[in-house]
Structures are given as C-alpha cells and as structure tokens.
Image (cartoon, rainbow, N blue to C red):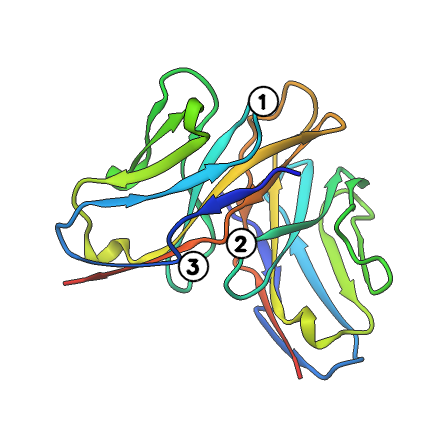
C-alpha cells in the first residue's frame, strides 16, 4: 500500500515570499490533515478536511495560510507571505474517515516538507 | 484545552538498558492514546495505541505502554533497548470536538541508544 506522498521535501525561501506544499493521501482515505512541526515541538494541527470540506481550521493563521482539497483527494497548503517563524516541517496525514463513532481511525503521516524562511 | 506533557526531552541509554518514557495528558473524559515514533530521516509511524480494554498495550518492536486513568498517564516502556531504537518518540491523545477528533501531540522525547 502506498503511503502519504508529500512534495517538495525541502524548501528554502526568503521572508515575504510565497510557498506551496502538495500532499497526496493514501488511496481511499477521506480525511486529510495538515500539521506544523516547529523544531523541538510536537506536530500541531493546522487544518483538517473530510473529503473536500474543511471540518477544523481553528489553528490555521488565515491571514497568510490557505489550504484546499478541491476534488477530495490531494491537497495544497500555501503560505503567502511567509514569515521567519513559519520555518518548520509541514506534515500531511490521512485517515479512512472521521466522525461520531469513528474516532478509532489511525492517522498515517507523510515524510513532511522542511521549510526554511530566511 | 487538552494538553500532553512528555517529561524527558532527551534520553541517552546504553544498549540492553530498560526504557521508560513518561506521558501525561490533561483531559478527564474518554481518551484515545497513542505513541508515534520517528526514526532518523523517516516519517512518523504508529508504535502503539490504546482505545479501551486492557490498560497494558503491546506495540511493535517490543514496546508496551500502560494506561493509568487515575494518573492521566500513558508511559512507554521497553525492557531492553537496541541501537536501532534511536529515534524521537511522541505521545498523543485524541481531542473530540464537534463530532470530529484531532490528535494533540506532546513535544517529543529524543532517545539516543549507544552500542
């Protein structure tokens, strides 16, 4: 079974530039997550999709971050403009489905994109 | 808001030593608990999970964890570590909101095992 695919693996940009990350979840997984992992911290959820709808974006800095999952499969996370504090690893994860009674679905993670903002 | 606390940020052990990594969470209701591991250069992968039933959970590679509800703890253990266990270990707990759940991670414990 193919895992969660992410690209690029590494990205270096200057502050105020824009950047985009791509994620392709495991086939058949309805739920997709984007996490931010700052050095020395655990992953923090930015946004969660169920199919192509957003179910939780409470921790997404919406003034500069955006994400979409137009066809309910792959997803793009964008930062515009980037700040120094956005330097982190951005992880994508997927699970079969979420919802009442389905909390037992396991999240599978991609390798992440390491972003350095100079 | 729910939180997860991992007591040790860095642990250094020799091969064959016993391991115990602490994890405490703040939520008092029903919880799902996880330990994820990230080997150098690899992605996060599930080590073990607790949903219900026997509070002593066995995972891959000889790891186990014990859920102690009264202590809000889910400590990870391994009787004898190997050099290949060198990795970062994350404890996580499910937070339920609006019919959906999300994982809350601890800050992680970096384990180095010396031959």
Residue positioned 61% across, 37% down in the render: B2
The CA span between labels 3 and 2 is 15 Å
CB under 8 Å between callouts 3 and 2? no
Q: Which residue corresponds to mark 1?
A: B29
Question: Residue A53 at what x, y percent from top left?
Answer: 82, 39
Question: Residue B115 at what x, y percent from top left?
Answer: 14, 63
Please tell me whether mark 1 or mark 3 is closer to you in this view.
Answer: 1
Residue positioned 15% across, 50% down in the render: B17
Secondary structure, mark 1, is loop
Q: Which chain letter goes with mark 3?
A: B
Same chain for the residues at labels 1 and 3, yes or no? yes
Secondary structure, mark 3, is loop
CB under 8 Å between callouts 1 and 3? no
Question: Residue B25 at what x, y percent from top left?
Answer: 51, 36
Classify 10 Å Cα crowding around label 1: few (below 14), some (14-19), many (20 and above): few
Question: Residue A55 at what x, y percent from top left?
Answer: 78, 37
CB under 8 Å between callouts 2 and 1? no
Q: Which chain letter goes with mark 1?
A: B
- Residue B51 as seen in the image, left or right of residue B1: left
Secondary structure, mark 2, is loop
Classify 10 Å Cα crowding around label 3: few (below 14), some (14-19), many (20 and above): few
- Image mark for residue A76: none
Q: Which residue corresponds to mark 3?
A: B42
Closer to us: A73 or B9: B9
- Image mark for residue A42: 2
Residue B108 position (above or below residue B74): below
- Residue B80 as seen in the image, left or right of residue A8: left
């Amino acid at each position: 079974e193919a895992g969660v695919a992410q690209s690029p693996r590494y990205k270096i940009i200057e502050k105020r530039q824009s950047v985009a990350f791509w994620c392709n979840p495991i086939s058949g997984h309805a739920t997709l997550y984007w996490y931010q992992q700052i050095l020395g911290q655990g992953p923090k959820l930015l946004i969660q999709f169920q199919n192509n709808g957003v179910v939780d974006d409470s921790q997404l800095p919406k003034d500069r971050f955006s994400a979409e999952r137009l066809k309910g499969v792959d997803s793009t996370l964008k930062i515009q403009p980037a700040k120094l504090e956005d330097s982190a690893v951005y992880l994508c994860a997927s699970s079969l489905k979420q919802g009442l009674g389905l909390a037992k679905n396991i999240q599978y993670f991609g390798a992440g994109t390491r972003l350095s903002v100079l | 808001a729910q939180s997860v606390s991992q007591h040790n940020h860095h642990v250094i052990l020799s091969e064959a030593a016993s391991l115990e990594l602490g994890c405490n969470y703040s939520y008092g209701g029903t919880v799902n608990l996880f330990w994820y591991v990230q080997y150098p250069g690899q992605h996060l992968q599930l080590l073990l999970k607790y949903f219900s039933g026997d509070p002593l959970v066995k995972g891959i590679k000889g790891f186990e964890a014990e859920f102690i509800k009264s202590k809000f703890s889910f400590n990870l253990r391994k009787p004898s570590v190997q050099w290949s266990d060198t990795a970062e270990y994350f404890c996580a707990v499910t937070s339920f909101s609006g019919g959906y759940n999300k994982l809350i991670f601890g800050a992680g414990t970096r384990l180095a095992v010396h031959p």
